[in-house]
Structure formats: C-alpha cells, structure tokens
Image (cartoon, grey):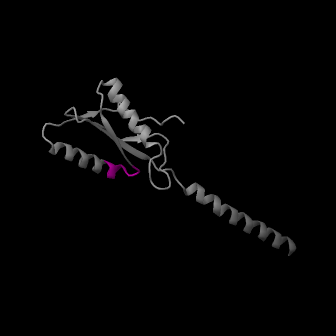
Amino acid sequence: MKYVRILFAVALAFVFCSAFTLKDKEKKEKAVYAFGVGASFNDSVVYFTEVQMLDSVELDKSGFLPKRDLYTYQLKNFLEYEMKKPDYTCMIYFSENKSKLEKEVSKVRGKYRKSKGVVLQVLPPAGFMFKKPQE
C-alpha cells in the first residue's frame, strides 16, 4: 500500500507539472503582416508596397510593432537612394490579421484615389521587401 501511495504521488506530480508545459506549447506565434506608404508634398506619385509577412516578428504586449520606425526608414531609404525620390514621408501599417490589413490597404488607396492628380504606384516585392532590423 505504501508503494501505491508513492506511485500515485509521483503520477500526480507528473500530471501537475505537465499541465504548465502544455500551455507554453499551445502558445503559437502569429504572423505579422505589414505594408508601407510613401507620399510627398512635392510629387504627385504615392508609392505603396504589397502586404508582406514580416520575418520572425511578434507584436509587443500593447499590440505595437517593435522597432516600427526602422521599418519606415527602410522604405524611406529605398525611395531616396534606389528610386532617387527624396523628401518622401513614409508610413507603415501592420496587423496579425492579413484580411483586415488588406481592407486597410484598399481604404488608404481609396483616400488617395479621391485626390485629383495623384498617381498610385505599387512597389513589387521583387523590388522592395521589409527586413528584420539589426539588433
């Protein structure tokens, strides 16, 4: 009977400890998607990137993209140095839900389409991709 109690206590401890490790395994990394917009007051062309999945990135506890300013500077530097388009203001939109982000793309594009004389140009993924900033 003494061995049964010890065996039962060990089994109970094993079940109790494994319950906490299962929670960590259930916690699954969600993909983060983003797109960028570059606009200038001096030019009628507005540049858009495609919706892209960001490589190995997680949103912080408050739901913000860490180092989002560095992603914005990637787009700004691309427009400035690769496309020779200085003085562009760049913005980045991000979400864990790709369909919501695609709705946001159409909403932002719609606002620019309403403006007369504005030309929308899409930057293909072959030309520009967001990269994880160096730490």
- 100 in magenta: yes
Q: Residue furthest left?
A: 116
- Residue at screen point 47% across, 56% down: 62
Residue 119 found in image quarter:
top left
Using the image as rendered, state which of residue 82 and residue 34 is in the foreground: 82
Q: Residue furthest right?
A: 2
Question: Would residue 47 appear left or right of 93 to someone viewing this image?
Answer: left
Q: Position of residue 104 (x, y in %)?
A: 29, 49
Q: Which residues are magenta?
A: 95-101
Q: Position of residue 31 (x, y in %)?
A: 45, 47
Instruction: Determine if residue 124 is in view.
Output: yes
Up/down of 66 relative to 117, above or below: below
Q: Position of residue 129 (x, y in %)?
A: 39, 33
Residue 7 found in image quarter:
bottom right
- 72 in magenta: no
In the rendered image, which quarter contains the N terminus?
Answer: bottom right
Up/down of 67 relative to 28, above or below: above
Query: Number of labelled discs?
Result: 0
Q: Position of residue 130 (x, y in %)?
A: 41, 35
